[in-house]
Image (cartoon, rainbow, N blue to C red):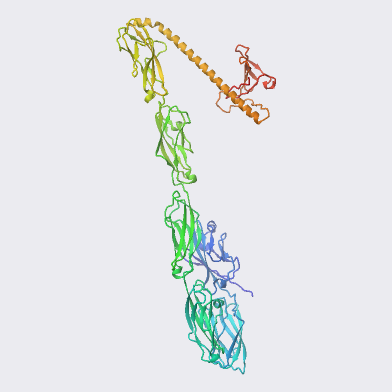
Amino acid sequence: MKRQVVLFLSVLCLQSALSQVSYSIPEEMAKGSLVGNIAQDLGLDVKRLLAGKARIHTGDNAEYIQLNREKGLLVIKEKIDREALCAQTTPCALHFQIAVENPIEIFPVTVEITDINDNAPVFEKDERRFEISESAVVGSKFLLEKAIDPDIGLNGLQSYTLKPNDHFVLKMHSQSDVRKKVEMILQKTLDREKQEFASLLLTAVDGGDPQRSGTMQIHITVLDVNDNAPVFTKNVYKASVKEDSVKGTLITKVSASDADKDSNGEISYVIGSSVAIIQNLFLVTEDGSLILNGPIDYEKSKEYEIDIEAVDRGGLSDSCKVIVDVGDINDNSPVINIISSSNTIGEDSRQSTVVAVMSVNDPDSGENGKVKCAINRNIPFSITSTASNFYSIVTDNDLDRERTSEYDITVTCSDEGVPSLSSSVTLTLQISDVNDNAPVFERSSYEAYVVENNPPGLSIFTVKARDTDWNQNARVSYLLEDSSVNGVPVSSYVSVSADSGVIHAVRSFDYEQIKDFQFHVKAQDGGSPPLSSNVTVKIQIQDQNDNPPQVLYPVQTGGSVVAEMVPRSADVGYLVTKVVAVDVDSGQNAWLSYKLQKATDRALFEVGLQNGEIRTIRQVNDKDAAKQRLAVIVEDNGQPSRSATVIVNVAVADSFPEVLSEFTDLIHDKEYNDNLTFYLVLALAVVSFLFITCVVVIISVKIYRWRQSRIMYHSNLPVIPYYPPRYSDTLGTGTLQHVYNYEVCRTTDSRKSDCKFGRAGSQNVLIMDPSSTGTIQRIQSEKSILDEPDSPIEVRNLVHPLLSLQFSDF
């Protein structure tokens, strides 16, 4: 049958804290049908729905409505049957929430499902048989089976008709369960002799458009004699039973009486309700006891209305109603549903930041259905109730990742029943790091010592700072703060490794120029913006005995001779002169001692160990030489000690003319001695140079032979070194600009050796011919020596700037 479904939408904008939106739609709408523009009704932009990952939360209920986030519309996901969803409950509505994240928002939505006339009244049985005594008085009542119409309101069962109605009329009674109780009342006495059997048609009609109906055949057999019907003591019985009662529990007992005797007075009890669930849950015994026959649940139905019929053997009957109230017990734990939650939260989050939103429901009623939720203690979070059955977990204190980087938040919800039932759920929340801690040095200041004359690049010591943040925020780099030492930038004295904090000396320190200096090192993390801290570093230069004593007096001049005059009448202890010297070092390195190294007459003079005073130690006599030469050595107290020598000329005479005549030849002797000293030093330097050169050459030959053996070991191919013309100096430390070839040719007689020097980019060769007397000849070579396989000498090409000579095998 073709039906026209009229869709009507009504949006009720409820002014509440949660902006609740309500819609009303008819049942049986096709899949994909529009329910409403939720984005417009909530005042949200479609982009907000997309960015916030909007979704529908229905808890444990089936999802009949779906959200089209791209258009902001609510549409039908599954066809809705109001009768299957709500049965006779009115109003019938779907309750769900729309959750939006970033920030978290919850919007309750109610969709009311209205009824359409899609069901016809139906009798459970197609026919009903009655046996009625002909003595039945006018007004006798016969309870008929009620028709069932799942629809409600006007679409539900409205009326009954009975045809033909010569002897009977129908009477309907409205009941609290919406269904209509119908009785067939005898209005005209029966006469078995006229009509023993009668067939009637009972029609049940609803009020829908189009109207629907259902029928049942009633077959009546007229009996003789029994003229009294059973009568119940009460029309309505009330009883109660707990929902946890076991099968077989006695609920109540009904009682009816019949004035007839014998078999006509025997009464049997039957349940007249045609609802299948009542037939399954309850039964009545022969004595009228109403027994529980199945499990009942308060959360499904709080009350049952049961029609019980008392029938005698003559077919007369009476009926009564039993109202059974179901008592609630605390048999359901609270149900916790996480609507939205965050996995991570920044440690700089403000207080009252929402971490999670959840709904909590307890199907029980009264105190058994009241729920309280709490979270574990000693954590910076709290749980608050935002609306009916909704809770939010929020921050209630400052977070610090360095103290606690992860929280396990356990939510426990308990009802107020006895005994109390509870449920719990645990959320794991990671605290993400922000750069809120500056690096901290291990010390408030540093002090280090370094001995002067250190090599540049020397590692002095290490500063260390730690950052309690994580990852990039904890990556510490070290910087040298800009400052100056005696007007010179501190960076020319020291440097600091950015990664390790190792402080290196940039230059060699001289204690005599600078004894100490200080600077600042900054430790900076890798956060954004970066945080930093400074520390003061003081470097103490330690003295080294690197300066010999310097003689201030007597002054040593190169062209003249200075002599001290001692009269021949000088007595013991006569002060001849005083050697004055200083040492720029410090401490014991500057402690000086004076000793007489050489003297013309050691028995005549002595030198003060500490003061350098030269005094006579005996009486001067005529036998003493007029020219006295003293060599005084001045030593410091360093390790190793350094010294300086001063020559003191003493003239033993009583007058200046005598002194001058005695020292005329002394100048010439001094010049001779100076020249001799110069030549001795020069010869020593030449010999040392030759020795060092020989050592370097021998080491180079050994290294070359080892490398050649390695090359020949790994390859059977001949190796011919190739150097392109004008090969550039890659090291940049030499003084020559191009490639030079040095060819050293050795024979068994080293006195007959050739040494050839080649110029870069040409074939000019310098040849040192042993037969020549040191004359170097420049010739033009037209052919490489490598092209002469029979040559008895072996050539090695060397590249500047190494300038190392490599010799062939002897």
Name the quarter where the N terminus is drawn.
Answer: bottom right
Front one among 251 and 159: 251
317, above or below 717, in the image: below
Query: Does residue 212 appear anywhere in the picture?
Result: yes
Residue lying farthest bottom?
A: 193
**Picture quadrant where residue 798 is located:** top right
Direction from residue 657 to residue 531 in the image, left or right: right
Q: Is residue 529 above or below residue 557?
A: below
* Image position of 25 with respect to 407: above or below: below
Q: Nearer the viewer, residue 460 or 388?
A: 460
Residue 419 x/y as whole percent: 44, 67
List x then y, in percent, for residue 72.
55, 61
Query: How many discs appear?
Result: 0
Residue 274 point in image, percent of width and height: 56, 80
- Can residue 736 be spotted in the picture? no
Q: Residue at x 52, y 16 (%)?
A: 687
Residue 168, by quadrant, is: bottom right
In which quadrant of the rendered image does the C terminus lie? top right
Across and down, in percent, residue 726 comes to 62, 25
Q: Is residue 623 above or below residue 365?
A: above
Residue at the location (56% across, 28% down)? 731
Residue at image x 59%, y 87%? Answer: 130
Of residue 414 and residue 502, the one placed in the foreground of this image is: 414
